[in-house]
Image (cartoon, rainbow, N blue to C red):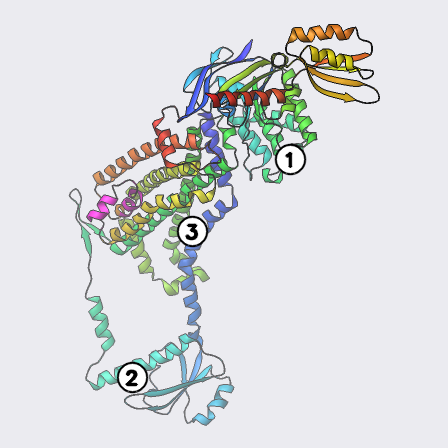
Amino acid sequence: MNIIEIHRMFKSYGQKVALNNINLSIPQNSIFGFLGPNGAGKTTLIRILTGIIVPDLGQVLINGQELNQLSVKKIGYLPEERGLYKKMKVGEQAIYLAVLKGLTRQDAERRLKQWFEKLDISDWWNKTVDTLSKGMQQKIQFIISTIHQPEVLILDEPFSGLDPINREILGNEILELNKSGMTIVLSTHDMNSVEQFCDRVVLIDKGNVLLSGKVTEVKQAQKSFLYEFCFKQNNELFINQCSQLGAKIVSINKNDMEFCVKVQFQNAPEAESILTHTLGQIGLISFREILPSIHDIFVESIIRNSDTTNRL
Amino acid sequence: MNELFHVIQREYMTRVRSKSFILITLLTPLFLSLLLLLPTYFATQHEDYKQIKIGLIDLVHSLDRAFDESELIVETIKNQTVENVRDLVLSDQWEGIVYIASSDSSEISVQYYSSKQPSVFLLNQIKSAIQKMVLNEKLAIYGIKNVEEMIRSIKESISIENIKIGADSAAQKASSPYQQSLCMALGLTIYLFIFLFSSQVMRGVLEEKTNRIVELIITSISPVKFMAGKIIGIALLGLTQIVCWIALLYGFTFLLSNFQDLSASGNMGNIMNQRINPDDVSQILNNLNLIDFDVIIPAFVFFFVGGYLLYASIFAAIAATANYSDDIQQVTMIVTIPLILSIIILSNTINSPDSAISYWFSIIPFTSPIVMMGRVVYGVPLQDILLSMLFLTATVAFIIWLSGKIYKTAILYSGKKIKFFEIISWLKNTNN
């Protein structure tokens, strides 16, 4: 079941089209990656989902109901451009922001204190924000974005500026929230985070969806029939067979232990044919299909889209 | 509505608890009171010469009665010459010695000998006593006597009483000097309040935009509601300060009206007693009673709130379009021109509250909060006040709508500078 559905979404700022007829579904309890270069339209889309701006055309459904003032409360949001009142005390400020999300003061205080204890930051409660580092402030902002226990949590670059330890702490919290049933939307340029956390992605460029789906499906769809074969020793016969079939030898790596060849085929039957031959060869240690990384898919798709747009 | 209340509460509470607000609220009336009392205090300090005993050696013998009416304690020292003055001064019997050696029709030679530097007040006192004596003597030569009484009687014989006659009421005695002071005071106060509190709104909006908290907040509350909450919260802060100051000033007036009791029992009373005549105090209070505070106080609150809402909304929109405080300095200066113009018009209103220029600027909404406030002191027809209020209310409603549209789009823009035509295109776009 989809928790968010976006239909025929269009938004422009003057002459500039920010979103062009976007259709998108975000399944419940998924960790959904929003990918795209700067200025692709991700922030505009997030701002529409959080009710900050309204689209020129199109519809957003949350649990099948149109987005409105009430249903927008089901969404938590950690913006990329985030900050806090510098001279206000951490606890007082967190309560204020939690109360704005509809919690009572007592509930807000109770839940916040639980979070502060969990992240071992209780001694920050009475400190003013300007005494905290950027990473510390980010933890507070993360807590505030999820304090009202939303059904969907949108995180825009949640790991930027965090050291590896805090990154891991925050990552674990995101996974835990997802396990508890929360749907996570992760907008980021950090492709390692996408590989690590996301089960689904959408790639947006110039206001258009270039590709979307499960990470494994996207990788399968974008694969280039690249395989790696490792032998006990130098195997010229294999290299010749590949060349005869028209396959491209991408790289050869030799060391004392093994002889590895990366080969790119034209299509699946060609790959299957050589695999059948190779399986019978003496000395084959291993072979594996190399799927493209999200980073590679991102770069290639954006370059391809840019070429297409320029040609048009 | 709940969110709006929380925003108002935060804007109000964080500021009302700040040390600067508490200090300004308490210290400003105290400072004003000190401004009134300090000159009196210093004047009493300068009157120490009254207790000083000085000696007089008058070789001319025509000026030995010069100090008869003086407040100085003067002892005539007979049969002494200038050679003995040094010993007399060093004997510490007198603070100093006035030595009059010669006198002719054009010049009188007077020396004052002392071991310490005398005050200017003391020397002036000696000089004025001698001058008075010489003047009277010379006038007497021309056959003119009692010149002081003559001058006093001329001054007292001219007095203008200003009686205002209304169509619907009896003749009313008005008091121009007090009205002029009140007109200026109210005009300046409302100018300061509008400027100070509108600037607070501007600083707040700019802070929220530059430290990026605004995007976090407007997921919970609409931008326009958030802006309204900020403006209302700071308006309540301003009203709190006004109420505190009125209470403190009433307290001060109460003390003033009872000062006769105080004067009988304490040092402060003694100080005031030397400077303020009880009749004058009762005159001040009578004149204050003649001013229509039943109209002035509600008008002050209305024009403060109206003027503040007008300028605070404009300042909020300006701050929302900026990325740094430097971006808004020039625009702010342009927007405050009507406020400065109001103060210039107010100087005309003091002298002629019903002139055409005062009338029109008290109707135009951008200047009316200050100029109308100045006019109200003199008594303005009710229809003029209502017309001014109507124009101000309509303009405030329009400006809030306009500023809200600019604010909600501009507050999310960061990085690049927003151009004027972009703002116009937002206003045309119904979705923004």
For disc 3, the neighbor class at 10 Å (few under 14, some 14 to 19, many from 20) is some
Placement of B351 over or under A2, stated as above or below: below
Placement of B239 over or under B33, stated as above or below: above
In the image shown, does A207 or B364 lie closer to the viewer? A207
Residue B3: image location, x then y, percent: 47, 27
Farthest residue toward the left? B167
- Counting residues from the start of the chain, the first of labels 2 and 3 encountered is 3
Q: Is residue A137 visible?
A: yes
Task: Classify residue B148 as left or right of residue B63.
Answer: left
Q: Chain of mark 3?
A: B
Q: Which residues are magenta?
A: B352-374
Give how far apart the Cα atoms at labels 2 and 1 are.
Answer: 83 Å
Task: Classify residue A136 as left or right of residue B348.
Answer: right
Q: Quadrant of the C terminus of chain B?
A: top left
Q: In the figure, residue B175 lies in which quadrant?
A: bottom left
Do discs 2 and 3 share a chain?
yes
Q: Quadrant of the N terminus of chain B?
A: top left
Q: Chain of mark 1?
A: A
Which one is closest to the eye, mark 3 or mark 1?
1
User: For mark 1, what is the residue?
Assistant: A124
Residue B396: image location, x then y, percent: 32, 35
Identity of the amino acid at label 3?
A: Pro
Placement of A229 over or under B313, stated as above or below: above
User: For mark 2, what is the residue?
Assistant: B134
Residue at image location 36% in from the left, 88% down from the top = B109
Q: Are marks 3 and 1 in contact (CB under 8 Å)?
A: no
User: For mark 3, what is the residue?
Assistant: B29
